Amino acid sequence: MNILVLRSSFQTDEFVEKEYAELLRRLKNECQAEITIVGDESTDERIVSSSHFDYVMIATGGVENLFKRIMPSTGKLIADGRNNSLAAALEILTYLEGQGRKGKIIHGTNDEIITAIQPSAGLLNGIRIGLFGQPSDWLIASGVDRDYLLEHFDVETLDIDLQRLIDGIHAVPQADAVKVAQAIVKRSKAVKEPSCADMVEAAKAYLAIKKICTEERLDAMTIRCFDIVKTCGTTSCLALALLNDEGIVAGCEGDMQTLMSMILAKRLCGEEAFMANPSNLTDHSAMLAHCTIPLAMCNDISIRSHFESGIGVAIQGMMPLTDYTLFKWGGSKLDRYFVTEAQAVEAPYSDHFCRTQITLNVDIRPYLLQHSIGNHHVVIRGKHAEEIKNYFRN
């Protein structure tokens, strides 16, 4: 986390460091903040304005024009009120609103300020994401600016050549894949379309993806899965289900926005997430479906073929009828989100949609049909809307 501290030319850096010693110490120690102090007489404003800051701390009055000249990318202001800091922050906030920019002021005691910003401090820092191939061709609005991810969240993305994965699948020992396949069959309620050979090939995909994740020290991954279907005659649905259970956040189709939603669900809420397509909407319910799901989210599973292709292995998970949170974090710079809570309700299974299906008692048609953040959304077990809203308020 980077915090820019602004002071007037009537004060010095030493004054700020002494006056706000306790708050600055806690920001550094408890929020892992890097502090940059800039005065109104500064001559290096262009260097500062090109840097990323998560918050701007207003240390004194008289810094309004300094803020305007630098124009930091963030509108999140910290002002405890001393030295006319709140007055200056109010003027800056009004200016930002006049420019059509969002802003907010974090005001209060040191404890209140630290509590307000600590949940977001370093939550995603150091995450390594593997992109196995490019996003699927139909995902025309689901990308994320990778430079922005690195700069703002310290999230690193690595390109993984699909040929490396394909070669890895072919190299998996048959005995290792058979062992995995047998274990999955044993824990399944039923195996419908897939043959034993299909199970073994899906297990090979899992072992090959897992090997690369280990080699590259990946915390998360997403894959252009249909290329594997076409090239290897198998699917990655089983692999993604198992990887999510093992703590590697794994998503489909190269959808980075939804993968970031899943990562936030894991890091913030401590829950795996079901990445799914909104598939059927009424004025009181929404059904979501996909062909893979973390097995830990299910009461029972059945082994099915992949819905669109009829090839390989997919997961039909039976999810408990309990409370869920529906969530999506999106935009190329992750500047939008949607969250709501609902309960799962009994609903008939349909052969016209992907294998795992869940129906929630919520009307999200106005949002989805007019303002949706892409296609895929994530379903998280439990009530987490307020937790997620608090993260984005910060």
Image (spheres, rainbow, N blue to C red):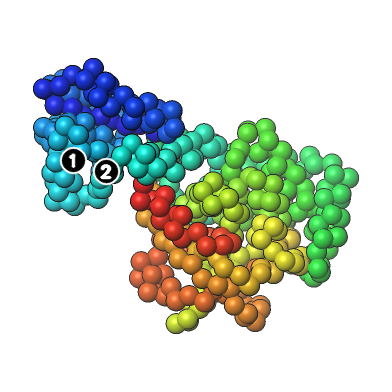
SS of the residue under disc 2: loop
**How many marks do you count on the picture?**
2
Looking at numbered disc 2 in the image, what kind of residue is underneath it? His
Q: Is residue 306 visible?
A: no
Residue highlighted by disc 1? 86
- Picture quadrant of residue 187: bottom right
For marks 1 and 2, give the CA distance: 8 Å
Residue 44: x and y in percent read 20, 21
Give the left or right position of residue 206, taking residue 135 as reference. Answer: right
Mark 2 nearby-residue class (10 Å; few <14, some 14–19, many ≥20): some
The single residue placed furthest to the top in the displayed view is 14
Give the residue at x 58% y 73%. Answer: 344
Residue 174: x and y in percent read 86, 45
Most foreground residue, 122 or 386: 386
Residue highlighted by disc 2? 107
Q: Disc 1 vs disc 2: Cβ atoms closer than 8 Å?
A: yes
Residue 27: x and y in percent read 38, 31
Above-or-below relation of 225 to 57? below
Looking at numbered disc 1 in the image, what kind of residue is underneath it? Leu
Among the two numbered marks 1 and 2 on one chain, the one whose residue lies closer to the N terminus: 1
The single residue placed furthest to the right in the displayed view is 175
Considering the image in quadrants, where does the N terminus appear?
Answer: top left
Above-or-below relation of 287 to 301? below
Give the left or right position of residue 132, taking residue 199 as reference. Answer: left
SS of the residue under disc 1: helix
Give the residue at x 86% y 49%. Answer: 179
Q: Is residue 322 visible?
A: yes
- Picture quadrant of residue 212: top right
Above-or-below relation of 83 to 98? above
Above-or-below relation of 235 to 85? below
Give the residue at x 21% y 31%. Answer: 59
Give the residue at x 58% y 57%. Answer: 273
